[in-house]
């Protein structure tokens, strides 16, 4: 049975969304899934310059055995195996929520409530780093063309990210770029946030990256931490 395929040539990055998860990669609602003190755990923004993904593979050994006369008796290569993606995201907008959502940290608080103007990070955040599980979604610009009146958006999802780290940054005449790095982990089938863009039931355990052409428009970029839907 043949399957009709819809192809595209993705270009540009429109908006991304970061969602805080529990250790199993499942979105959690309420204060348990929020940045401490905010009651919210979803961030949507367009202030990024690049998100790069680097697939990682465990290189299989080559097993070689020689005969007594020096010629090869066995020459077998264990296949390489995919392990995960390494994600590097560069942000030209320093959104204070990025740090507590991705690497563990806290929003600065002037009183009992967060002011939302800054963040703190340090060795006292190491325990939170172990608990920093999150997902990343990116929407790209609709492909150009007049094939159909329906608008399709290239959509990427990394349903489970761990081991977040902050990259080097310089303060000088150029833009000060905030860099976040992380590794993908096995997705949970209960990661429902991407259902409108992938279709319900599309995410399976062990998935690390999903891509789809979706007719559902991306969410709008804001400067707010929102509640987990």
Image: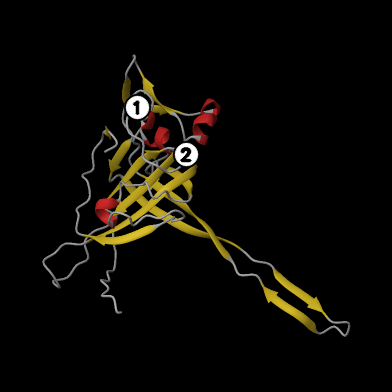
What secondary structure is found at the residue carrying circle 2? loop
Looking at the rendering, in which quadrant would you find the N terminus? bottom left
Height in image: 72 above or below 149?
below
Q: Residues within 10 Å of mark 1 (few under 14, many from 20)?
A: some
Height in image: 180 above or below 67?
above
Q: Position of residue 196 (x, y in %)?
A: 24, 52
Q: Residue visible at 27% across and 71% down?
A: 7
Residue furthest top in the image: 111
Q: Residue visible at 35% across and 16% down?
A: 110
Decide: marks 2, 1 in contact (CB < 8 A)?
no
Locate residue 181 relative to residue 157 in the image: left or right: right
Q: Residue visible at 47% across and 51% down?
A: 186
Q: Position of residue 160 (x, y in %)?
A: 43, 47
- Most foreground residue, 8 or 20: 20
Height in image: 53 above or below 62?
above
- Most foreground residue, 74 or 55: 74
- Residue picked out by circle 1: 31
Quarter holding residue 74: bottom right
What secondary structure is found at the residue carrying circle 1? helix
Quarter holding residue 29: top left
Q: Position of residue 188 (x, y in %)?
A: 42, 48
Looking at the rendering, in which quadrant would you find the C terminus? top left
- Residue picked out by circle 2: 23
Q: Position of residue 208 (x, y in %)?
A: 44, 55
The answer to whether residue 148 is seen in the rendering is yes
């Amino acid at each position: 049975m043949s399957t009709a395929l819809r192809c595209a040539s993705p270009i540009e990055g429109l908006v991304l969304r970061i969602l805080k998860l529990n250790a199993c990669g499942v979105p959690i609602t309420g204060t348990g899934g929020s940045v401490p003190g905010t009651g919210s755990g979803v961030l949507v923004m367009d202030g990024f310059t690049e998100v790069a993904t680097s697939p990682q593979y465990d290189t299989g050994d080559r097993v070689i055995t020689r005969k007594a006369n020096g010629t090869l008796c066995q020459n077998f290569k264990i296949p390489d195996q995919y392990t995960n993606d390494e994600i590097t995201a560069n942000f030209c907008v320093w959104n204070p929520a990025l740090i507590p959502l991705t690497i563990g940290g806290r929003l600065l608080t002037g009183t009992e409530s967060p002011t939302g103007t800054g963040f703190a990070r340090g060795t006292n955040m190491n325990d939170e780093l172990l608990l920093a599980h999150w997902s990343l979604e990116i929407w790209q610009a609709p492909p150009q063309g007049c094939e159909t009146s329906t608008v399709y958006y290239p959509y990427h999802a990394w349903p489970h990210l761990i081991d977040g780290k902050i990259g080097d940054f310089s303060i000088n005449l150029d833009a000060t770029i905030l860099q976040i790095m992380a590794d993908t982990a096995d997705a949970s089938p209960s990661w429902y946030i991407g259902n409108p863009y992938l279709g319900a039931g599309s995410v399976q355990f062990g998935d690390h990256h999903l891509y789809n052409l979706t007719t559902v428009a991306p969410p709008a970029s804001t400067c707010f931490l929102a509640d987990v839907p």
